[in-house]
Amino acid sequence: MTTQKSKTPKNPKKPTQKKVIKRKATKKKAIRKTTIKRKASNKNTSNKQTSNKKTSRKKTTKKSSGRFGFLFNRYSLLGLIAFLTIFSSYLVYLNIQITDKMSGRIWSLPSHVYARPLELYQGKYLTVKQLVSELTQTEYTRVQNRPTKAGQYRILNESHFEIISRDFTYWDGEQKSQGIRLSIYNNKISILHELYSDKTLPIFRLEPVKIAGIYPSTKEDRQLIKLDEVPDDLVLALLTVEDRRFYDHWGVDPRSIIRAMLANLMAGGTVQGGSTLTQQLVKNLFLSPERTLSRKINEALMALLLEINYDKSVILETYINEVYLGQNGAQQIHGFELASQYYFASSLRKLRRDQMALLVGLVKGPSWYEPRKHPERARARRDQVLKLMHEQDALTQAQLNKYMALGLGLAKKPRFSANRFPALVDLVKRQLKQDYNEEDLKSSGLQVFTSIDPFIQSQAEASVKRVISGLEKNYQQAEQLQTSLIVASSQQGEIQAMVSDRKPTFPGFNRSLDAVRQIGSLIKPAIYLTALQQPHRYTLASKLDDSPLHIKTSKEKLWSPQNYDKKFSGDILLFNALNKSRNVPTVRLGLDIGLSDISDTLHNLGVKREIPAYPSMTLGAFSLSPFDVANMYQTFAANGFNVPLKVIREVLNKDGQPLKRYPLESEKTIDEKSIYLVNHVLHQVTQTGTAKSLSNLFPQSLAGKTGTTDDLRDSWFAGFSDNQLAVAWIGRDDNQSTGLTGSSGALRLWSDLFKHLNIDSMELIQPAGVNKIWIDAESGGLSNKNCLGAVELPFIQGSEPTEKAECKSAGFIEQIKRFFN
Amino acid sequence: MPNQQVFFLLLFLSVFLLTACAPQSVIDKPATGVLPIADNPQLPDVIKSLISQSDSQYINNDFAGALATLERAVRINPRYAEVWSRMAQVYLKQGKLEQARQHAKRSNSVIKNNDSLREFNNQIIKPNSNDIQKEQLH
C-alpha cells in the first residue's frame, strides 16, 4: 500500500502476497458480507473481552493483598480513569470532526456551466455535421450496430440518426433516457420518431454540453461520480494496488503495517506504505501532510472512527472522488472521473482497462508518473498495475499482453478547460454575482444553465480568426487589431456567443464587456428615432440641411463637423441622411430635437451609462461597450421591446433542485410606429446605404448600421435578422488608428459570421396607423411608383406629405424592376 | 302537412348553416383554472405540444414551469402571438400585472390577422386588467 501524494518513490512497490481479492458481484453484496463478518467478529471480540475481564479480576484480587497495594491500585485506577476520560473526550472530539465534515459539504464543488440544450423538432434547421458535433461534445459514443445503451448513437445512410439519450435533470424536471430516431433532409429535421416505433415526437431535448467550471479559490476541481457508476474493473484495480484487505479491516490493517515495516527495514528506507484506503482518505480530508508520530496516531484513530460511522461503500465512493491525481496549471485534479476527463478526454465509464490501470497507478505519485511529462515512467507503472490485475485473475494472459502492448492512449488536449470560453464564462459569473456570493459560486456545485450555443460560438471564433488575420494582411495600416463579437437571439435577448479577443480562448481583458469605446455613427438611429417620435415635426421625407456648420462650443472654440467624404450635399431627405450616414445634417437634427431627448431615447433603448450632453455626442463622441451597443440594437431588432441581454436561464443546486430561473423580461420602451420607420431605413442601409455590400451576400432581408470614429480608431457594425443579432467591433487597445471604417472592418467580420449561421429574413410587420406612400426622393413631395426617383416610404398616419412632386417617367426597365421588387 | 315539413326543414337548415358559418372564436371562454385554447391551425406541432405542456403545468399551479415551457416555444419561433399571449395570462394569474401587460403588448406586436386575440390581449393591457386577474383567481 502506498501513501497518496507520496514523494518520488525510489522503488515502486511489489506485490507481497498473492491473495486473490474476490470482488463480489456487486459492491453491495461485498459490503453486506463484510457487515456479517463484522457482526461475527464483534461477538467474538466481546466474548474474548468478557473472559479477559474475568481473568484480570482474579489476578487483581491476588495482587491486592500487599501492604501498599491498596494505595497503588487506587492511584493507578484514578490515573486510568483520568486517562480514559481524556482519551474518550479526544475521541469524541475527533468523531465530531469526522461527522461534521462527512455530513456537510465534504468538498468545495465548482459550479458547472451548461450550454443550451439542443431542441430537436420537425422542421428545425440542423446539419448532420452540427448534430454529430453536438453528440460528440456531450460524449455520445457512435456505434455501428443498433444503439442499446444510453449515450450511444448510430448514423445510417449519412442522414438518419438513432440516438439513446441519457437521463438528465433540467430546471423543469427530469427527462428520462429515451430512444429517438431522426432524419435530416436538406439541413432540416424531416422526421423525429421514437426509436423502433412510428410514434412521432413533437419535440425532444438533447442534454446540454457542459462548457465550463467556476472553480474554488483552492483551484480544486472534481466531478462527482457515484459508486454504482464506477466501473468494476477500476475498483478492482484500485483495491488490488492500494488496499487488498479493504473489505476486511477496520480502517487500520496491522498486517499491512507490519509487512510495510519489514519491507522498509529490508530496503533501508521507505519503499512501502501501510496505510489503508481509509487512512489515506482521513489524511487527505482531515490532516496535514506532515509525517509525525502524533499525526500517524490521529490518522489511525480517525480511520477507526470513520469505519465505525460509515459504510465501506461511502468510504470507497468518497475516496474515489477525493484522491488527488494531477495538476492542470494551477488547477488540482481530484477524483477519478475528472482525471479521466483530463488525461483521456472521456468519462470514466468509457475507459479501457489499461487506461483505468494508468489512473490507478497515478495514485502513488501523480507528478512522478505524470503521463504527459513522463510517458515512460507512466507506462511502466501502468504495466505494473496490469500485472497485479493479472495476478489477481482479473486479466487473462492474453488480455495482459494485449493491454501492455497498447500505448497510453492519452488525449492531446484535456476535454475540460476553465478557459475554453473565457469571455462567456466571465459574463456568466458577473450575472451570477448579482444573486450569489463569490464563495457559494465557487464551492456549492451550482449547475448553471445558459443560452450559450456551442455551434454559434465556434462559428464566431472561426470568423474572428479568419477576418482579423485577413484584414491585417490586406490593409497595411491594420495591425495589432483587437476585436469583440457578440451574438444574441434578436427577439429574446439571449446571448448565444461572445468573443472578446483576437485569440478567442485567451482569458484576458474582456473587451465585449469592458472595452468602452466611442460608438461613432451607431448613435444615429437613436437620433432619427427621437425625431420620428414627433411626426408633426419630422417624417422620413423631411428635408435636412447638409451644408457647412459651425458651432461655438466655448468662448474661443468652434466645432465644424464634417461628413465622411468631406463634402456637403445641400438639402437631403431625412431617410437618406440616415441611410448614407451623413454627419452634418445629423448634428443639425440632434441639436434641433435636443440632447436630453436623445439621451432619454438611448436609455429607453437599453443603454444604462451616463450620456454626455454636448453637441458632438450627436456623432457618437461618447463611449459604450460592445455589450451596451448590443443591448441598444436589440431593442431595434425586437421592434421597440427592450429585453435586457442575459446569458443565464436557470440555476440548480448540486442535487438538481431548482434554485432560480431568470425569466424572459420584455418591456415596450419605444412606440412601434417610430421604430418601424427607423427599421425600414436600417434595412435600406443594407441595400443601398453604407452596408450595401450585404445585399450581394445575403438573399435574406437584414438591417444594421455601420460606425466609424475619428481617425478610424473604431470600426463598428451592429445588425440583425429576424432571429439573430450581432455586434462587431474592431479597434486597437492603444486607441490608435486601425485604418478601417465600419464597412471595411467590422461589417466584414459580421457578414463572415452571418454567412455561417442559419439566418431568417427580417420580418417587419407594418403597425396599424402607418401607411406606405411613394414620394420623390429629391424633393420629398408626393409621387408615384412610375415616376423617376420615386421611393416608397412609411409614414405615421397624418404626417404624410401633401405637396405633389413633378413626375418624370421612370422608364420601362426601372418600372419592371419596381414591379418585381 | 308537406308544406309545414318543408318549412321546418328549411328553418333547421338555415339555423345549421348560420351556426356553421359563424366566425369561430379563437379564444374560448376559459373554464375555471384552464387557459383558453389557442385555436390557430397554423401553429406547428412543436408549438402546440409546448403550449399543451404549459397548460398542464398551469392547471397544476406550476406557473414558473408553464412560463419556462412557453419560453421554449418563443425560442423556437417568437412570431406566434398565441404564445406571448399565453405568457401574459400566466403572469396575470401570478398577479404580475406589469409583466402580463408587456407580454400582451408583445403578442399584439406579432399578430397578423387575429382580431379576437388582439381583443383578448387588450383586455389585459387596459388599466383595469386586474379585474380579469381577479376573475382568473376565482
Image (tube, coloured by chain):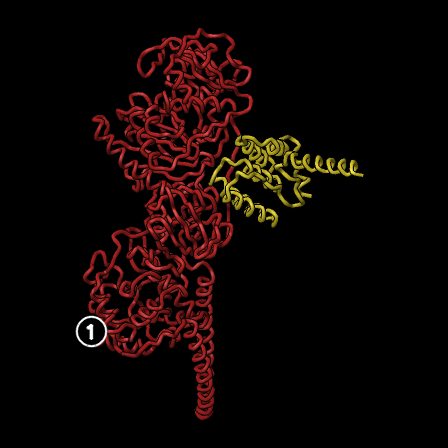
- The reply, left or right, for residue A675 in relation to residue A8 is right
Tell me which residue sits at (50%, 11%) in the image.
A801
For the C terminus of chain A, which image quadrant?
top left
Q: Quadrant of residue A101?
A: bottom left
Which residue ends up furthest to the top in the rendered image?
A806
Q: Which chain is yellow?
A: B
Residue drawn at (26%, 36%), measured in percent from left and top? A466
Q: Chain of mark 1?
A: A
Q: Is residue A695 above or below residue A49?
A: above
Whether residue A82 can be seen here: yes
SS class of the residue under badge 1? loop
Is A205 positioned to the left or the right of A258 in the image?
right
> What residue is pinned by disc 1?
A268
* Residues packed near mark 1 inside 10 Å, few (<14), some (14 to 19) or many (20 plus): few
- Where residue A182 appears, x then y in whole percent? 41, 50
Asked whether residue A294 appears in the rendered view, the answer is: no
Provide the letter of the chain coloured red.
A
Image coordinates of residue A625 in percent, x first then y, are 38, 31
A134 or B3: which is nearer to us? B3
Frontmost residue, A317 versus A145: A145
| Residue A64 image offset from top left, x and y in percent | 45, 90
Residue placed most toward the observer, A13 or A92: A13
Q: Label 1 sits on what residue type?
A: Gly
Would you place residue A451 above or below residue A562 in this image? below
Q: Which one is nearer the viewer's eye here, A17 or B111? A: B111
User: Residue A395 sits in which quadrant?
Assistant: bottom left
Residue farthest toward the right in the current orientation of the protein:
B1
Quarter of the image where the N terminus of chain A is located = bottom left
Residue at 41 percent of width and 74 percent of height = A30
Name the residue at the left extreme.
A376
Vertical relation: A124 (above or below) A219: above
